[in-house]
Amino acid sequence: MKNKPPKKAPKQQHVYNRINAHRFLEKLRKIETPQEQFYYLRGLDAFVFEEMVMTSLKRKGFIIVRNEGYTGDGGIDGRAYYNDQHFLVQVKRYKGHIKATDIKEFAAISERRKGRGLFVHTGKTGDKAKAIAKELNIEVVSGVRLLDLLLSKPLEETQSILLTPLANAVFIRC
């Protein structure tokens, strides 16, 4: 059985997970192949992975608003702002394909909360999920795009879909 850190109060847990997020982002940079990097990411604590994504968005210039708790968040793991754009962020650690229903549910939440949906995950995005994400205007970040975000690699201009100052940011249409 794995040794787990002692249970902390919510605020302490956020601080602990943010510290670990920075540490694990540095470790991720030292892993040589994408396959090993994804294996590593999928083995992380889900909340630490969530903090890694939020920290990486912050490094890209976004203003980040983290939730006070990790559970009971109504399907939104955080919010990110860049200029006049408001993104609702959902972060998932998947090993297999994401479900189209996950995208649909997140799109409904994003629409209700009047934000642009950003669905970040470690799994695979199949054709059906890609089509639904495109139709519902949900940005999906996975695969090489996820590694680009976490490792802060710039994307080629031709990969960007946003016609705002985010043109050099991480989001591309799947």
Image (cartoon, rainbow, N blue to C red):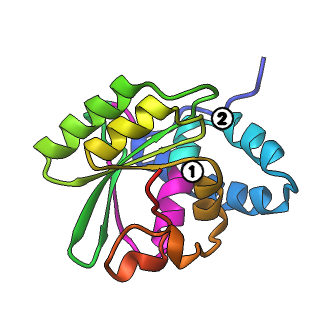
> Which corner quadrant of the image does residue 69 belong to?
top left
Q: Which residue is mark 1?
A: 16
Residue at x-position 32% and y-position 76%:
163
Furthest residue toward top: 1
Q: Residue 105: in sight, yes or no?
A: yes
Of residue 94 and residue 56, the one placed in the foreground of this image is 94
Residue at x-position 41% and y-position 49%:
11
Residue at x-position 61% and y-position 33%:
6
Please name the amino acid that badge 1 sits on.
Answer: Tyr
| Image x and y of residue 47, in percent | 52, 40
Please name the amino acid that badge 2 sits on.
Answer: Pro
| Image x and y of residue 63, in percent | 35, 71
Q: CA distance from mark 2 to mark 1?
A: 10 Å
| Image x and y of residue 100, in percent | 38, 27
Mark 2 or mark 1, earlier in chain: 2
Q: Is residue 84 above or below residue 136?
A: below
Residue at x-position 45% and y-position 62%:
171
Of residue 51 and residue 129, the one placed in the foreground of this image is 129
Q: Is residue 20 magenta?
A: no
User: Pointer 1: residues within 10 angstroms few (<14), some, or many (20+)?
Assistant: some
Q: Is residue 70 magenta?
A: yes
- The segment highlighted magenta reads 51-71
Q: Quadrant of the N terminus?
A: top right
Q: Which residue is mark 2?
A: 5
User: Pointer 2: residues within 10 angstroms few (<14), some, or many (20+)?
Assistant: few
Q: Residue 69: in sight, yes or no?
A: no
Circle 1 SS class: helix
User: Would you say the residues marked 2 and 1 are in contact, meaning their CB atoms lie under 8 Å apart?
Assistant: yes
Q: In this rendering, would 123 be left or right of 166?
A: right
